[in-house]
Amino acid sequence: MVTMFRTSWILLYLTFLHLVGIYLFTRGFLLSRLSLSTVASCTDPAFPCTLKPTHKRAVLLIIDSLRFDFLSPHPPEPHSPYHHNVLTIPRELTAKQPRNSFLFNAHADPPTVTLQRIKALVTGSLPTFVDIGHNFGGASIAEDSIIQQLQLANKSIAFMGDDTWLTVFPTAFHPEMSHDFDSFNVEDLHTVDNGVIANLFPLLTNSTHAHSWDFLIGHFLGVDHVGHRVGPDHPTMRGKQQQMNDVLKRVVDALDKDTLLVVLGDHGMDRKGDHGGDGDLEVSSGLWIYSKGPALSSKNQPTLNLPHKTFPGEPSPHRWVQQIDLVPTLSLLLGLPIPFNNLGTVIPELFWRDRSGSEYTKALDINARQVHAYLDTYRNSPSGGELDGMWIALEEYWARFRSGRPKEKPEAAVDYNRLALETCRSLWARFNPALMVGGLGVIALSLIVGWGIYERSHSLGEWEIWTTSLVGMIGLSTGAGAALAAVAHTLVGRFKLLDGITLYQSVLFGASVSSGVRVLISAPPKLRISWTTPILLLHSIAFLSNSYVFWEDRIVPFFLLFTLVPPLLTAMSAPTARLRYRILTFAAIFAGCVRLVSISTVCREEQQPWCNVTFFSGSGAAEPPVLVRFLLIPAAVLVPYGIRRVLAMSRSDNGIASLVLPYVLPPALITGSVYWLLEWLDASGVYEYPAFLDLRWARSTLAWTSVVAVLCGIALWILVPVALHISSERTGAGASQKTEVRVLGFANAYGAPFAVLWALFLAPVWLAAQPSAQISLALITIALFAHLELIDAVRDARALQASFAANPAGALARLQQGGTTTEVAHEQGVVAVTLDEVVPLALLARLAFFASGHQATLSSIQWKSAFVLTSTVSYPLSPLLVILNSFGPTTLVALAASLIGIWNVAPLSVVPDAPPTPDRGTTPAPEAPPKSQAQVAMLAAVRAALGTSQYFGGLLLGSALSAALLRRHLMVWKVFAPRYMLGAVELLCVDVVVLVGLWLGVGRIVKRITRVFELPAPKAGSSGGSTDGQQLVKNDRI
């Protein structure tokens, strides 16, 4: 007998292959940048490392997410009344004092998240793409930085604001002048800013420490939090910018002439107020440098060939710099050495103080020598080979700088620095082709192995024989492969042919390949082309086109509608009008829901201007559309009702379904919807409410109420995973008296309890999803159950056709006695799940991802969800809620994969009386004893889970292949790398949820149902269908 241990072990093995493939490819594709610990110092008198300082002290004010157009003198047209022409003090002073005040559009390298930008702003180096994962908990900076140079110069540093700074510099700040505040509570718009203000001005005026600091850092978070909360086009943003403008006016008034003021944004924000990616709005930050004392620039500054750039929508270009150019500039203005790892270039305007620009020439000379020293050290490091392709060009530019005439040196120095920057920028990720190929090979092998296992699961008999020795087979081959790989790595490693590959990685690769090949030998895949096979192939290989990645959200609905062709063809030839009506009805419901769900969209930057945001009320507003607000509560009420109505079609709305669907699920969904309505009311400020009402407390209470309801429902389900109603009635008299047992819900005894469990998992996803996503989830739920009913109707139609073709009399007898012809296949141990049934589910899962407000971009992460249960960041709840918001819709649909195998599968197959035959006259053959369908149901669920995992595995292979082949493509980090990362996380999530569905769902249901219908073998001479005077009567399907 097939057991859940065997099936789950096989899926665990495939998950192991997926993990190994993803690990190897990721280690080869997304390697962290090598950090050099060397510290800049002035050791060679012939080459000075700094300049005479222009200022004794500096104030660095970071206004988080300060986009350049918030400061621009010529903001985009049409002007926004909420964030344009509000923060005006920088442009006013720049217009009045052009030698003392300088305003720049500063380019912030992605990823545009605070931790990585802080690292860049103090070291002058480039962040790596993979470092974004550290934003929830970063490590201290080991590289040289302007903070470390200040410490080496015995300077005192004051700090106040975003507590991320203390993560990377835990001991750098003066203990009596350090005031940190929680940075992740995006719902709190004022606490951090008010805290910074309260501690900033005493240090600028008359406190006991007013003259004790040399460098002051203030990091405001209000603008960023307003952006995340309501978007930039909101009255709250105007109020926050007015506050910042007033703060800057007060700071300017309080400054003395020896203090330099630097104000900047660590990054920008997109139209919704989010950031993280590399869109133009996200990488464009404002930078303002102001000297109240000595002028930094000469009146006679020549017109230099300085880069300008036009901000999107602005009428004219503006002076443009790299944000990391601030690091060498600020260091030299304060008389400090430039941090050793810096790749920025000094800003010319701040050093041109005479006709010849001598100070600027000195600054560039120091800057260029520092960059060359860094590259030379990097070249001699273990990762120095990465520079091989550009080293000749770099040396040529360096030689041109050293041998150039005095007038040519500044330009040569700038050219060298910029070439160094672009060279290192191209090395964000150090590729290891061997690991990438190994990872791709294991991922491809997992697909082939999975396909072979999928084919084996077609027949119960073959499956039981094959799985008997499977555990030992995989164990021995895994051990042998690991041992051989270890020996090979040791031998080959002596010749340095495996640089960058560890013994651990070799062992993983060898174990995976050896075991995978062994499984393939015992279960070779067979090529079976179905209607949906081209969809899988096209969906996978299309990732080689960046245009397809851009528009995947629009193409998936077309793929889904294409999968309806086989059911529609079956409907045309269905043997009964009822089956034809059922197929056409559920196909229409499915298609309608797909079309409605696809309306909900957020737009990638590359889709503009051909895309309109419908997930929010507008491209610049982070609030739900008006219609969505009205539909939220009705949707939360109708979803449980609709699920119960579907179960009532098979009379399986009993038992656990009669408890969870009317009494547990509605409160859980309604509280989740009310939470987001209150969040909108709280954030929008549309309605004034009494001060004593704490909406934050009310929202948290509602969220926890939903969680408690779900936990109670799951506990109840674990105790009673049955949706049956069993009643008995005595019939006849005397010796012929019998007990007739009537079972309601018999035909869907496996599927109904699993549907209830699925509904319970819907509730937490619903809670974490924003309002438009909740409406999409409601439609996805309808589409899912329509798909299940469509599968059932198509199976009945096809089985009836085959049965009539083989045995018309037997098929007619089965229909007359209430049986379904699909039971014939089950009795023969044939699992009916096909790829044409699984692919629509996988595509529906992909559509759920897009319809819930997500794209394969970092900026589409909905950080609001981190605060559903708590008002501040709480570990591990906040990260888990963000994951649930991002991947919950996809994995929720994937969880339903098991339903494809067990939907409307009766636990017992009762073969009807055979029709009269010529040799028997009119005497019918005796009815065969009931046969348990537990084994077939479990195997069918495993087959459906395998098929779903295979589809997502195919998408991962396609996205990984595109990232590998196009790793030098201009858009690799903007398009192909994020899509690969999304594919990897989705596959692992799908692997986990299908295992949960099999372990917690199918395994427990089958075990309990088997106990309920465990019947002894019928006695000789007993009447057909009765056992010890009992007769089982199953209900008919409505």
Image (cartoon, rainbow, N blue to C red):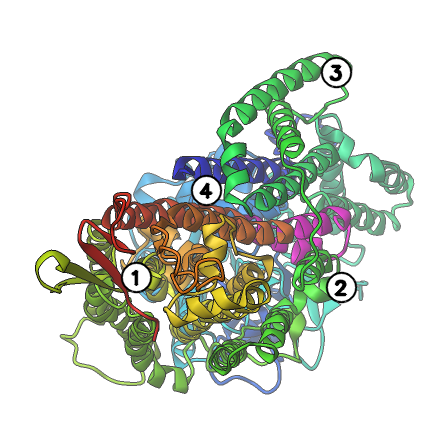
* Residue with the mark numbered 3: 492
Q: Which mark is residue 746?
A: 1
Residue 971 shown in magenta = yes
Residue 373 lies in what quarter of the image?
A: top right
Residue in the foreground of this view, choosing between 197 and 361: 197
**Magenta region:** 956-984
Indicate which label's residue lies in the foreground, 3 or 4.
3
Q: Quadrant of the C terminus?
A: bottom left
Q: Is residue 689 left or right of residue 890?
A: left
Disc 2 residue crowd, few under 14, some 14–19, many 20+, Cα 10 Å: few
Task: Tell me if residue 133 comes above or below residue 318 in the rendering.
Answer: above
Residue drawn where x is 58% and y is 59% of the image? 277
Three-letter code for the amino acid on which mark 4 is drawn:
Gly
Three-letter code for the amino acid on which mark 1 is drawn:
Phe
Residue in the foreground of this view, choosing between 982 and 69: 982
Residue in the foreground of this view, choosing between 381 and 37: 381
Residue drawn where x is 52% and y is 26% of the image? 469
Q: CA distance from mark 1 to mark 4?
A: 55 Å
